[in-house]
Image (cartoon, rainbow, N blue to C red):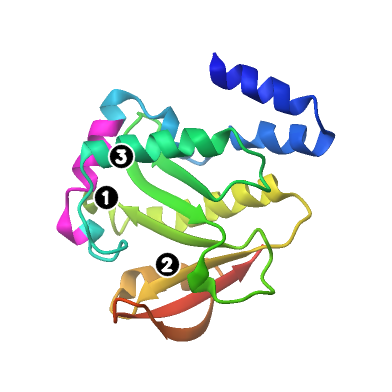
Amino acid sequence: MAITKTIRKTRKHSKSVKSNTKLLTKTINTNCEALIPIYKLTPSQIGQLTFITSNKTTMKHIGTGKLWKRIDILQYIKDELAQHRKTIEDREYFTYVMISQTGKVIGLISGRKNIKLLGNNKKSQYDILLRMFIGALDTGKGFGKSIISKFAILYKEMIGFNNANLISDIAVDNLASIKIHDANGFNFIKQIKYPNGKFYKRYVKKI
């Protein structure tokens, strides 16, 4: 109830905020899978996501490679709810989970704004750095391409006529992810070295 009241109050202030706030809860559902905000997961789905993120192979190229526990996912949900209360201009990150028609968790995708690693002072305020993964049992089925495509559609609807770049930094040995981004119209820009000493290939797509 507190969330609903906050949204209604925000909508009274400006038409643009009204439009943006409405889109923040939007669920993209095309073909057989849907993207839902992480805070809409059921307890059962949280358990499924916990199982997926406990796989070393799945999490190898995600951040530091740390495995996520249930408490970590609950914190992501808490953080996303706090972001959900903000306007599109003020939000810093967006986290969505792909589920099947039966409610099975397939994977996760998130985008973050205002990342120092982007290293471009002239970038659009809507540029976001992506990270995504598909559960080990569902890799090789086209879900990687699908989750990025759906997220691009969703995010473009959120920002409206504003320009933005979807940016992915992919570990040089993550050939499967490189192939997925190539198939989604991303362009290779340059190879970069992260503070942790690892090398990544930067891919960018304008939306």
Marks 3 and 1 in Cβ contact (< 8 Å):
no
Query: Mark 2 sits on what residue?
Result: 180
Q: Nearer the viewer, residue 6 or 156?
A: 6
First of labels 2, 3 by sequence position = 3
Q: Nearer the viewer, mark 3 or mark 1?
A: 3
Q: Residue at x 55, y 76 (%)?
A: 119
Q: Nearer the viewer, residue 98 or 118?
A: 118
Q: Nearer the viewer, residue 100 or 195?
A: 195
Q: Measure how far apart labels 2 and 1 are at the Cα level.
A: 15 Å
Query: Mark 1 sits on what residue?
Result: 135
Query: Mark 3 sits on what residue?
Result: 73
Q: Which residue sits furthest top?
A: 1
**SS at circle 1:** loop
* 119 vs 50: above or below: below
Q: Nearer the viewer, mark 2 or mark 3?
A: 3
Task: Check the picture and name the quadrant holding the C terminus.
Answer: bottom right
User: What's the magenta region?
Assistant: 46-57
Q: Residue at x 42, y 80 (%)?
A: 201
Is 75 one of the magenta-colored residues?
A: no
The residue type indicated by label 3 comes to Ile
Instruction: Please state the horizontal and vertical placement of residue 104, each as a whole percent of the image.
Output: 31, 34
First of labels 3, 1 by sequence position = 3
Instruction: Please state the horizontal and vertical placement of residue 166, each as a whole percent of the image.
Output: 57, 64
The residue type indicated by label 2 comes to Ile
Using a 10 Å C-alpha cutoff, classify the residue at mark 3 as few (fewer than 14 neighbours), some (14 to 19) or many (20 or more): some
